[in-house]
Image: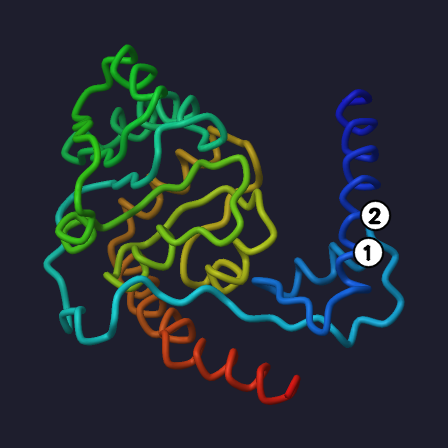
């Protein structure tokens, strides 16, 4: 813990100095979420925060590509690269606990990378590792998605899941997670990196279908905040202000 604190302090100072220079040279400094602006303000010792502009990433799918409703199956879905930093090594412990309590549910993993071997060697029961696939048909079927990453900028797999009424469970390990998941109302936020609690939250969603459906409905409504039309408007407003 001491080493981590020292490294973090060094990196924050290094990043802070870089961001301060960039901020001073910029007409506007665009961040993905307000917590990012607050973090950079702190470590870069920025006094005048008027250059910060919050513009979220736009949703992957257009509203016209989404069905009014989906028939959900007992599937927990992981979508993403199977690489270092994505927390792939956490999935076996989580899934063993979930599958033991809910043997009629399956884990479907979409993605590829060097950590695929980690999952294959774990020999998890009721787990399909399918490699890189177009995820939309799986979003349409899955009821729950999981995100175990150490850190992200703005995780598109969360918003993609929400667009399809899939309830995400994610570690609250990066600044935008709470914004994307509406502070836990559009998905479940788990303190990093409590594997037992993560598994318990997934199991709780499985066991409580009413809560799952209500959260999925809210997620589908809330995620419209990030539809492309809104994001384009934000960028146009910024350019008009700068001109």
Residue 46 spot, x, y in % from top left = 85, 62
Is 235 left, or right, of 113 in this rendering? Answer: right
Q: CA distance from mark 2 to mark 1?
A: 5 Å
Residue 26 spot, x, y in % from top left = 73, 67
Residue at (20%, 30%) from the top-left corner? 131
Viewer-nearest residue: 132 or 179:
132
The C terminus lies in quadrant: bottom right
Query: What secondary structure is marked by label 1?
Result: helix
Residue 42 spot, x, y in % from top left = 82, 55
Viewer-nearest residue: 214 or 236:
236
Give the class, few, some or many, for how many residues have Cα within 10 Å of label 1's Cα (few <14, many ≥20).
some
> Which residue position holds label 2?
17
Per the rendering, the mark at residue 20 is 1
Residue at (66%, 58%) from the top-left corner? 36
Residue 91 spot, x, y in % from top left = 37, 27
Image quadrant in which you'd find residue 67? bottom left
Tag 2 near tag 1, CB within 8 Å: yes
Per the rendering, the mark at residue 139 is none
Image quadrant in which you'd find residue 116? top left
Viewer-nearest residue: 30 or 42:
30
Q: Residue furthest left?
A: 71
Residue at (27%, 45%) from the top-left corner? 206
């Amino acid at each position: 813990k001491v080493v981590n604190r020292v490294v973090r302090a060094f990196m924050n100072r290094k990043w802070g100095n870089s961001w301060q220079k960039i901020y001073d040279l910029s007409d506007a400094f665009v961040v993905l979420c307000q917590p990012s602006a607050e973090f950079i303000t702190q470590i870069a010792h920025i006094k005048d925060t008027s250059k910060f502009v919050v513009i979220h990433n736009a949703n992957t799918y257009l509203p016209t590509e989404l069905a009014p409703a989906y028939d959900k199956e007992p599937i927990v879905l992981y979508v993403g690269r199977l690489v270092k930093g994505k927390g792939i090594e956490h999935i076996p412990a989580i899934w063993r606990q979930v599958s033991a309590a809910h043997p009629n549910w399956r884990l479907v993993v979409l993605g590829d990378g060097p950590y695929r071997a980690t999952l294959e060697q774990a020999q998890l029961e009721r787990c399909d590792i399918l490699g890189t696939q177009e995820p939309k048909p799986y979003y349409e079927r899955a009821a729950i998605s999981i995100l175990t990453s150490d850190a992200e900028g703005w995780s598109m797999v969360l918003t993609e899941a929400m667009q399809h009424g899939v309830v995400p469970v994610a570690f609250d390990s990066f600044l935008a997670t709470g914004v994307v998941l509406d502070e836990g109302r559009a998905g479940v936020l788990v303190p990093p990196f409590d594997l037992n609690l993560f598994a318990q939250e997934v199991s709780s969603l499985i066991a409580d279908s009413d809560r799952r459906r209500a959260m999925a409905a809210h997620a589908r409504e809330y995620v419209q905040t990030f539809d492309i039309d809104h994001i384009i408007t934000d960028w146009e407003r910024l350019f008009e202000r700068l001109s």
